[in-house]
Amino acid sequence: MHTVEANWEDEENNRHVAFAVMYARKDDSVEIQAVTPKQVTFLCPESNNPLRSIGVWTESGRDMLLNQLRASGHMSKLEDQVFSSLAV
């Protein structure tokens, strides 16, 4: 099993969320084993510049962010992001 960093740009909520993604390679694809939210960076809605960053330390905070990630439909993009990082 391997780990890679991935990001989700949540434009609706003006933030970037950094994740640690544990994955396993399966033939010509990637199987995501676990996704752990690590940090949230809040952005200025007008300039899109970072305002502040906070670490995600609690299980409830991680669960909330994972639920929001799934609801956004970004999980398949996350798989693509991990797979493309392996092609480098």
Image (tube, rainbow, N blue to C red):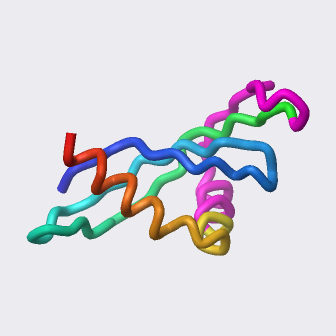
Q: Position of residue 86 (x, y in %)?
A: 22, 47
Along the line of sight, the residue nearer the viewer: 81 or 61: 81
Horizontal side, residue 20 vs residue 46: left or right: left
Q: Residue at x 50, y 67 (%)?
A: 75
48 vs 25: above or below? above
Q: Position of residue 85 (x, y in %)?
A: 29, 45
Res 22 quadrant in image: bottom left
Residue 49 part of the magenta segment: yes
Q: Position of residue 84 (x, y in %)?
A: 30, 51
Q: What's drawn in magenta, residue-wise?
A: 45-66
Residue 22 part of the magenta segment: no
Look at the image and tell me in which quarter the C terminus lies: top left
Horizontal side, residue 56 vs residue 31: left or right: right
Q: Residue at x 62, y 50 (%)?
A: 58
Q: Residue at x 61, y 45 (%)?
A: 17
Q: Position of residue 70 (x, y in %)?
A: 59, 72
66 vs 18: above or below? below
